[in-house]
Image: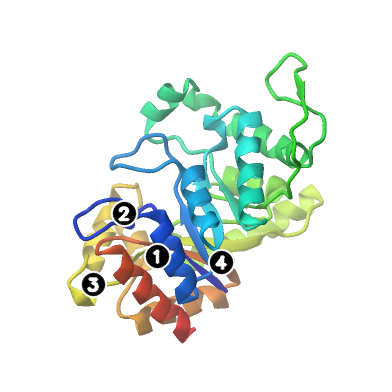
Amino acid sequence: MKVGIGHTTLATADGAIADPVEVARHAEELGLDSLWCSDHLMWGTPILESALTLAAAAAVTRRLEVGFAVLQPALRPVAWLAKQISTLQTISGGRVQLGVGIGGMPEEEWAAAGVSVRERASRTDDALRVLPALLRGELVELPGTSGTEVTLSPAAPMPKVWVGGASPAALRRTARFGDAWLPAVATLEQLRAGREVLREEAEAAGRPAPGIGVSVFATLDAHLGGMSHEALVDMCGGFGYPREHADAAVVSGKPEQVAERLAALAEEGVEHAVVVPFGGEWRRQCDLLAEANALL
């Protein structure tokens, strides 16, 4: 199982956004497999633009994979989205992991982008349908236009597509368009159930069964005075997760305990764990995750 770290929640000791260049270099030196970031125009806290963040990380590394966890395709015109992804693939030498989701919160960012939040699911499906051909440099009729056709150049390999979300619609979207499923804050039982649904949906769609990843909310330095397990569970309630679910899904403890939880995910067939740390200085978060990863 590969182990990556989420950049969006990483901060300096004084609360500033962690420099993605420094984080990427350090993560690669530590032997972590990937760096991921969220995709929002606006959020409750300051947030960097996702494609530029990953481009900065890719430019200073050679091995580290760079991923969206998750990108919201519906916020952008699909041709522009394809150009961003193909450019990032070129800069990184094919190291992009394309996590996608329909999003929806906060609603203000949809108004700011000039897109109706009610169209997010259909726009996401339309984007996933044409992105492979756009990246291959083929002539493509753009969805939602009156026969507008474009060809983008240079061509680039289509990244692996991870579909976020845990709803029945998200699982169907994964089976139709995705290479793998990437739910957030998922319990082991939820992953088992989702895997069975994916097999059935993929068989019905005539596609191979998708792989499974998971985005894991974690407090890695609670034993050093960082955010407590209980505080992280409470925070998950603000994202709509019931307390019992969050308590079973989040990861906390010393590196040995974190490694044990990650090993349990690997036993369930998880091929890539994206650890999203909360609380504490970014370098310590990376170091503690690397300790746990080494124990795997």
Marks 4 and 2 sit apart, C-alpha to C-alpha, by: 21 Å
Give me the residue at 55% from left, 26% from top: 119
Give me the residue at 82% from left, 35% from top: 138
Quick check: 9 left or right of 192?
left
Q: Considering only order in the chain, which callout, 2 or 3, is on the residue closer to the N terminus?
A: 3
Q: Label 2 is placed on what type of residue?
A: Cys
Residue 272 circle label: 4
Mark 3 or 1, which is nearer the eye? 3
Instruction: Name the residue tied to disc 3.
Output: 222
Quick check: 62 left or right of 276?
right
Residue 236 circle label: 2
Query: Is residue 48 visible in this depiction of the protein?
Result: yes
Label 1 secondary element: helix
Quadrant position of residue 200: bottom right
Label 4 secondary element: strand
Q: Which residue in the rendered view is the most extreme toward the front?
A: 60
Q: Nearer the viewer, residue 151 or 266?
A: 151
Q: Are marks 1 and 2 in contact (CB under 8 Å)?
A: yes
Q: Considering only order in the chain, which callout, 1 or 4, is on the residue closer to the N terminus?
A: 1
Q: Label 1 is placed on what type of residue?
A: Ala
Instruction: Name the residue tied to disc 1.
Output: 249
Marks 3 and 1 sit apart, C-alpha to C-alpha, by: 16 Å
Label 3 secondary element: helix
Quadrant position of residue 5: bottom left
Q: Label 3 is placed on what type of residue?
A: Ala
Residue 205 circle label: none
Q: Label 4 is placed on what type of residue?
A: His
